[in-house]
Image (cartoon, rainbow, N blue to C red):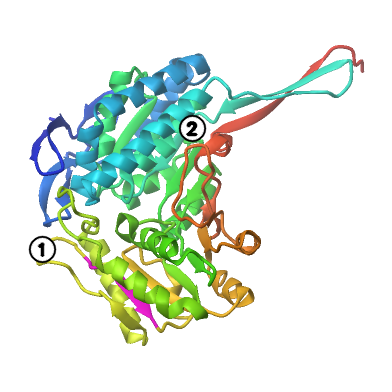
Amino acid sequence: MVHTFTHEWNTPAHKGKTSFPTGLFINGQFVDGSDGKEIEVINPTNGKLITKVSEGTRKDVDTAVAAARKAVETTWGLNVSGAKRGELLNNLANLMEKNKAELAALEAMDNGKTYDWAFGTDLSFGISVIKYYAGWADKIHGQSIETDERKLVYTRHEPFGVVGQILPWNFPLLLFTWKIGPALAAGNAIVLKSSEFTPLTAIRMGQLIHEAGFPPGSVNIITGYGPIVGAALSEHPDIDKIAFTGSTLVGRKVMEAAAKSNLKATTLELGGKSPNIIFEDADLEQAVNWAAHGIFWNHGQACCAGSRIFVQSSIYDRFLKMFTEKAKSIKVGDPFHTNTDQGPQVSQVQYDRIMGYINSGKEQGATVHLGGDRYGNEGYFINPTIFTDTKPDMKIVQEEIFGPVGVVIKFEDEEDVLRQANDTVYGLAAAVFSQNINRALQTAHKLKAGTAWVNCVNQLHPNVPFGGYKQSGIGRELGEYALHHYTNVKAVHVNFGHKQ
């Protein structure tokens, strides 16, 4: 029997209630996992149990895929007009708006991000993404192509059919919208895996999707472990396309499984080690503020985090002093307190991983300029951390830490910083700070990254594509570009007069 999770908040940031089933959402219903097992959801603020949710299995994936395939062939896909798909997406956006505070509280509870950030950024952005793709749903079309007067040739952009989607734990609800928005607008049915660390908002969204009027099977949501549910999705012979957001290591496994099974289409949004370049002519106060946002936003748990901060030698000392004071001002604590800037890391596993990198930096000879230790006595809190005196081959310079840990590195000129900035296997994002627009743009154009910010960082919009170069992924999220990854192009030739 599917359990119901009920909780009431009475905190400075939010007061309210929630109640919803904790099962797998398959074919429009909440059901238990096929083997009856459950996954514990832990509060990262104190390490205590929040609730238990149903654990998905390979058998559950098979059931969900069959439901999705039936929906595509009967009640969804090309059986539903683009206008109707847009209407349903708008219904969902309106329901998210209606339940915005509750969804933000759930996100803060199992992820650890502050309620204010969840409400003001994750939810607001997520709602705008769904509305954006609602507008696209009846505008997905092909072209008529001139060949000669005795033929009509045109293209159709048709949905793939059944798509698998695998979500990370750092932006559970926001990336839920990034994934389902373009897929549903194009007419695909979805089998989605939420993270076992942060499943609550995805499960609650299943209720809202049902309430919005989406037909059974069009969206299926399974909480489970990567080696079981994630692998089953990647390998499944009746899934036409797989989309994954997460680490490069796991992305390789997803791509390999997709290739070895039915060579399904694959998009990957993977890791990053983004450079943030600050030239001597930058507005220093603004550069400091943006740099702090770049690395400490979401507790450093962002694939586009500006974790390598390159500062021109002539202003290095001034920047470091100001940046240190800015980092010291960040208030770490309970996500439901109104004055908190940074909550805990998402899990014990992630806490240990970050502390392992901090210890590695110390062992390899870098200087812990600030932080480098835990905050408080319970939960998974880590103080904002700054390393200096690093070398290019150190792990903290080369590898993605995914925590509130930045390295501040000195450079001399454009040639020097471009060499250092591009010395990475990643290429997700980069930033440049300069009041000389020629220098800023020339540098931005030479950075090997899918996104280049000038005099800002971590700026994302529903209509602007996001994705990486090199080992940061394949394909693009957001914007019209994302729709291209959820449609197949068919060329149709109609003969009027050619004779054989």
Q: Is residue 81 above or below residue 46?
A: above
Check disc 1 and report its element: helix, strand or loop: loop
Instruction: Name the residue carrying label 1.
Output: 378
Q: Is residue 231 magenta?
A: no
Seen as rendered, the residue at the extreme right is 500
Disc 2 to disc 1, how far (Cα)? 40 Å
Q: Residue at x 43, y 15 (%)?
A: 75
**In-image side of 10 versus 87 (left or right):** left
Residue 297 placement (x, y as % from top left): 34, 56
User: In the rendered image, which quarter contains the C terminus?
Assistant: top right
Residue 34 placement (x, y as % from top left): 23, 36
User: In the rendered image, which quarter contains the N terminus?
Assistant: top left
Q: Residue at x 57, y 69 (%)?
A: 422
- Identify the disc placed on residue 182: 2
Magenta segment, which residues?
Answer: 382-388
Check disc 2 and report its element: helix, strand or loop: helix
- Reading the chain from its start, which is encountered first: label 2 or label 1? 2
Crowd class of label 1 (few under 14; some 14 to 19; many from 20; radius 10 Å): few
* Along the line of sight, the residue nearer the viewer: 471 or 76: 471
